Amino acid sequence: MDKNKLRYGEFVREIQADHVYISYSDITNSSEQKSSKIKLRIIDVYRLVTPYISVRLLEQIYSLMPLALYLVIFQIFILRQELSGASAISVGLLAVIMGLMFFMEGIKQGLMPFGELIGNTLPKKVHLNLVLLIAFILGIGVTFAEPAIGALKTAGALVDVKTAPYLYLLLNDYASTLVLLVGGGVGLAAVLGTLRFIYSWSLKPFIYMSIIPTLVLTAYLMTDENLSVILGLAYDSGAVTTGPVTVPLVLALGIGIASAAGKGNNSLSGFGIVTLASVFPIFAVMLLGLFLSFNYSPQDIIELSLIASDIQTIQIPWYDKSPFVEMLLGIRAILPLVLFLFFVLKVILKEKLANSGIIIYGIVLAIFGMMIFNVGLTYGLAALGEQSGSLVAVAFSDVVLSNGQELEALYPYFLGLFVAVAFAWILGFGATLAEPALNALGITVENLTQGTFKKRTLMVAVSLGVGTGIAVGVLKIIFNIPIAYLLIPFYIIALIFTYFSDEKFVNIAWDSAGVTTGPITVPLVLAMGLGFGNAMNVTDGFGILSMASIGPIIAVLVTGLYVKKSQEK
């Protein structure tokens, strides 16, 4: 129909729930009458925009506020301690909510369609080798863009160089190298995951070939007193990589490539890549720590840190003392990834960007959201987690805070110990059960298994696994248990259950750990663990996230075996 001949008459607006429906009537082909413009009052604009924003805002509020309120209530009523810097933390949490709202919408409207477009077009125009190279580079790019990756850098400030020199070196002087190698691990996972999509390979051999060497290297590093401290960081890095940027974009690329190759109809397409993106970064971080041990002695690192701190004391740039640096990091995280995607589209594929206006709008939202989120992460989320973690120990032990304040134990030792562990378990269980990604995974799994593995069953199994994992991680810090003593046995148990499980349950179980590590859970748990470790005078406060990752794997594998047995009966 010729658009020039349309005339819009009566404008009818209907708003139902969170959707907006617009209908037009009195359409005529008469060219004699002048076309009338639609005039919207401020109240009309408000009614149109409110449902669009409120749904997305409420989603982030529901994700963050229960956790934040739980920490605050526990601190005030159970630990009987006031919330220090409440106003700054409140503003920071608001920034996290607003930043994530913009960021997640930007991912959906901009980066996700971009990844799907490239994934569907690449195999048709270039050789498979170039496709895999682009997948590898994309894996590195999405790691830098991951919101929770900033939590690792923020954690560097909480590490004491004298007690953990290699951990301090990794998180401060080699922070960018650390993220680059973690990204390299994700890139390798993207390559192998894409090949798995195309050739329909089983996930089990990949698990054996990646987990067994990782456990061997873990056992080797455990023998060195200084290097064993980095194991918690290495395993936590694997949990950080499977967030809201990495998983959707890499999956969109891989599934798009598999579909274009005519191999995307497998019901298990999409599963497995999250597992590989979790394991390879662990191995990469351990290798970096081993390499640094060959070039630096612990004493060298301590001396270098003292020199660096003296230089910073003499002259600190103004922007290092303000939120400006976090905002710049937000731009630096997203912009290179976007430029790379544009380069692939225009130079390699020579394609036009369909729906360019919407995609550019999404990219701008993602960058703006990341800038705000980074500020909120530093001044709100990390501050709240570190403060809560440092005070949990007061339940069962005398504590000296960083400001010199001495606090006496509130409860008898065993009762206080129970309070601390229960706090960690409820935090892990509740945070996971409220995770939107877990709900989506549960629906997928119920459809995949034709209803034999219920969505509710999966959600409870994963939440129990995460809660138990975080509780064990807290016990690890309290009793200063080397992380390898926990991780090696648990991963061996997971490998044994993997051997006896069906392929579909293996895919579900090993990927379920990825949905538990969102952009809110990771910074909170990381900061809480480090604050708790400092309060207990423990060298290594890392490791809680790694236990929260292996817990749901075992829980879902056990549940899968139970479901299989029930089916046989």
Image (cartoon, rainbow, N blue to C red):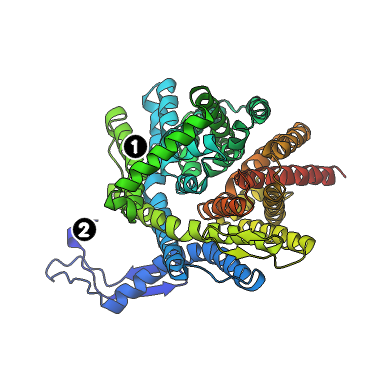
Q: Horizontal placement of 375 versus 203: left or right? A: left
Does residue 548 show up? yes
The kind of residue on which mark 1 rests is Leu
**Residue beneath the point at 60% across and 38% down:** 235
Q: Which mark is residue 3?
A: 2
Q: Which residue is mark 1?
A: 341
Q: Residues within 10 Å of mark 2 (few under 14, many from 20)?
A: few
State the image coordinates of residue 326 (x, y, percent, origin top left): 36, 51
State the image coordinates of residue 425 (x, y, percent, origin top left): 69, 57
The kind of residue on which mark 2 rests is Lys
Q: Secondary structure at mark 1?
A: helix
- Quadrant of the snapshot with the N terminus: bottom left
Residue nearest the viewer, comparing 375 with 512: 375
Residue extending furthest toward the right: 569
Residue nearest the viewer, comparing 162 with 531: 162
- Distance from Cα at disc 1 to Cα at disc 2: 34 Å
Q: Are marks 1 and 2 in contact (CB under 8 Å)?
A: no
